[in-house]
Each structure stands twice: as C-alpha cells, then as structure tokens.
Image: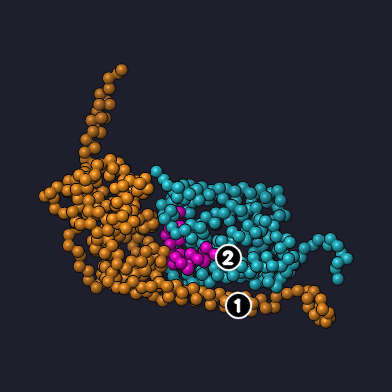
Amino acid sequence: MKRPTPYLVAVAMLLLPAAPTSGQDGRALFDQHCAACHTIGGGANGAPDLKGVTAQRDREWLLKFILNPEAVTRSGDPRAAELLRMYDGALMPAPEGLDRASILAILDYIASRSGADAAPAAAGPPPTFTPEDIARGRALYRGDLRLAGHGPSCLSCHAAGAADLLGAGSFGPALAGVTTRLNGANGLSAWLASPPTPVMRSVYRRAPLAADEVRALAAFLDAEATAAPQSGLPRAAAFAGLALAATVAGFLAIGIIWRDRFRAVRRPLVSMSGGSR
Amino acid sequence: MPSAGNYLDVALFSVLPYVALFTFLLVTIERYRGQAFTYSSLSSQFLENQQHFYGLVPFHYGILTVLTGHVVAFFLPAGLLWWNDHPARLYVLEAAGLIFGLLTLVGLLAIATRRLNVPRIREVTSVTDWIVLGLLLMQVASGVYVALVYPWGSSWFAAIVAPYLWSLLELAPNLGAIAPLPLAVKLHITNAYLLILFFPFTRLVHVLVVPNPYLWRRPQVVRWYRRAPSPARHG
C-alpha cells in the first residue's frame, strides 16, 4: 500500500481544525434555531429549559430527536412520549437546515452554558413598549402599514384584538394570549424573528420581518394578551349571510338581464292553439 | 423516517400534479388531432331549456370568475397581497369570491338535479358526465367551505399555495407549507388535480374551444341536426 502523499497529509491537516471551530457557531445557531422556544437556564415555558440537557441525555439520542422529533416520537420512544405529555401534545417542529455538525455545535454551546456558575442565557428583562409601538403593531397586523418584506399581513390568517366589520382570518391560530404561550414578550420576539412552524417559516423566510416590525408586533400582541378572545362565529355568520343574500340577488339579476331570452318554439304555439299538448 | 401521511402528501402533491398535467397535455392534443369533432360541450339545451337556464348561466359566470381569481393569484401573488393590505379591500375581494362561488355551487346543484330528474337528459348522460359532475361538485363545495371556514383565502393562497404551485413548475416541489394545511384545503387541491386529469376524456374539453362571444351574446337554442329515428312520432 502506498503511503499518503504529502499533499493528502496537508489537506487532512487543513481539514482537522475545522471541526472544533464549528463550536464557534453554536451560539448563533442556538439563537437562530432554538431561542424562539428554548432557554438555557431561563426557565421552561412552552418548551423545555435546556440547561443541563446534555448531561441528562446521551448525545446520540439528542441528535436523533432534534433531526426528526416526529419520527422519534412516532417510534414510541418513552422519553419523547413523556415530552409530548408534558407539553400538551405540542411536538417540536423539525428545525430546518440543521445537519449533524451544526446540532453538535449547538449541543456544545448548551453544555458550555450549563455549568453551575454559568449565568442564564435568558434575554434579559422584558422590554417596555410605548403606546406608539402598540399602535404601529396594530397597523402592521391589519395591513394598514405594509410589511417591509411584503409578506401578508397577520390579519390574513390570525385573529387578534378588536375585529373589523368582517373580522380576521381563522386559517391560523388565534393570537390572544400568545405572549403567555411563548415565554413572554422576549420569547414572542424571538419566535417572530425566526418562526419555527412550517407554514410561518415558509411564508416569512421569503419575506422576513424587520427588527422594528418584530418589536411593534410583539408590543401589539402583548397588549392584546389581556384582551378577551373574540368569537369568530358571529362575524363568519355575517359574512356568509351577506354573500348568500348577494347570491340570491345574482340569480334575480340573471333572470332580469336575460328576460327576453328565446325560450321555446313549440310551447307557445301549443298554448296559442288552445290544445292540451 | 417519513410516516404514511408523508408518503400520501408526496403522492398527492408532488406526483399527482405531474401525472395530471402530463395526461392533460398529451390527451387533449391527441384527441384534437384524432377526433377534433368530439370537442363539444354536448349541449342538452334542445332536450330541456327551462331548468337549464338557471343552472347553466350562474354556473358558468360563477366558475369563470372564480377560476380567473385563482389564475390571477397564481401569476400575481404579490399584487394580490398588495391589494389585500387594506382590510376593506380584502373584504370586498373575499365577498365577491364567495358570491361567485355560491352562484357556481347553486348553478351546479341545479344542473345535477336536472340531469337526475329529467328522463330525456338522464338518457343522454354518460358515466364520464357523472364523474365530471361529481368532481365539479366536490371542487366547488370544498372551495366554498374553505372560503367560509378558513378566511382569508386570497391572502394565504398568495403566500402559501402560489409558491407551492410555482415550485411544481420549477420541477422542485416544495411541500413544506402544504403538508400542514387543513384537510379541506388539501381536498380542494387534490380534487383540482383529478379534474385536470379527467378533463381531456370528458365534455370539459369544450373549455378549450369555446367561441368567446358565448360570454356576451344572447343565449340561443342549440339543435341537433340529425334525422329523427321514427318520424311517425312527430306531431
């Protein structure tokens, strides 16, 4: 067997240091992919606090679960089943664009922040919003103020706050109380900046929200968290009733527009002749 | 490891559309080359024209308007989102869509009832006609249901469905946002593919050769120019 050429050795030496440096990205990757729902020592609210998770679970399991949470849960894994129970059936969405190496980098980062003396990586005190923030958020939610990335306004799919004449969309979940579900205003902001659910991700990856838009929307949704959730039913009934009435009017219009239409040849002749048929 | 649901999604939303489109193109062209004179709506107006009017007219104006809306949303999703950015404009568009959808649905129900109840019409109705009616009913009913239960479809179509349809045309189907959609929406999309698939085998081909003045000229009586089988019964 031939000995490795100096060229190959040089390439190998160039490649070797690449692995440890990926730990450098752990923090950025965590912020981008995980921080929308998880903290490290900042408390669990809606998703597990990941402090110490690398010590509690073996890496191979964590890797497998993070790569495809649905598959692991479906396979009947008892730990995944327990997570599903703890979080009321809410399954972690598979993070997009993460491979083995980047997940390992994130796990390294979590491990490095999990020491007894490590300060919590929570994002500091909850932000204070001004009435202007809230008003701007409401305008962005309704669409009166266009999103910079030209994505659809929130009202297209989500109900939040006082509704207009015909109400808001109900394609996506209602947003009342969303701040509580997502770790407070900070969690909500992180969630909006990088939405983890498949539909939101696919829509707003093409049309990302600007940082000031995230802040305004978080302000508006936080303010609406205390408002009573509106019932969509009367609005939907009004919408359906309106459309039904207009449809009846449409039929009348059709009858009037074509009132002189050619109806038959034989029938009028028969009736004119006084015959029975 | 993908679950059974994933396989079904792939079959329905990234295989079926190509099968449907390919069949559509191949068979419409072959049928036109080989049997051009079968390109017809096979009008039954001659056999019965009272119930016919209140089914045919609202159905056609309804379906043409709603279909145009879908096509515009497919080609100009950004323009649609721009229009919908004011709730008042969104409401006008959505209400118009639902009204024309309801006109289509009621017209279609009238057409189906007529086909069932008028013996002369039932006599000339083939199995493919019933398949067409069934698929159309499913399509229009699911469309109206989605418009009522999952507002506001004009916006989420532009943001979710249009990019998916474009990904199909770019030969790189992206089901990321389609897989989690509600069942009724998936039914509407799947049934649309089935309609495209069956289209070239049915009377729907008349859509491709429609004389455009149909849309504004006065309705006229269509007659079959054919020697009567037993002249003695006339009179």
Query: From the viewer's perspective, is B183 left or right of A93?
Result: right
What subunit carries mark 2?
Answer: B
| Quadrant position of residue A99 | top left
Q: Measuring 47% from the left and 50% from the top, which residue is drawn there? A: B9
Is any atom of residue A143 visible in this view?
no
What subunit carries mark 1?
Answer: A
The orange chain is: A
The vertical placement of A181 against A18, above or below, is below
| Quadrant position of residue A158 | bottom left
Which residue carries the number 2 mark? B63
Q: Is residue B36 magenta?
A: no
Q: CA distance from mark 2 to mark 1?
A: 17 Å
How many neighbours does mark 1 have within 10 angstroms: few (below 14), some (14-19), or many (20 or more)? few
Return the x and y of residue A182 as percentages of the image width and height: 27, 61
| Quadrant holding the N terminus of chain B | top left
The cyan chain is: B
Q: Measuring 27% from the left and 26% from the top, which residue is drawn there? A: A7
Q: Is residue B156 magenta?
A: yes
The vertical placement of B133 against B176, above or below, is below
**Of the residues shown, which amino acid type is indicated by label 2?**
Ile
Return the x and y of residue B173 as percentages of the image width and height: 46, 49
Which residue carries the number 1 mark? A253
- Is A64 or B46 nearer to us in this picture? A64
Give the magenta part as a residue range: B141-164
Q: Measuring 70% from the left and 73% from the top, which residue is drawn there? A: B50
Query: From the viewer's perspective, is B205 left or right of A133?
Result: right
| Quadrant position of residue A209 | bottom left
The vertical placement of B173 against B59, above or below, is above
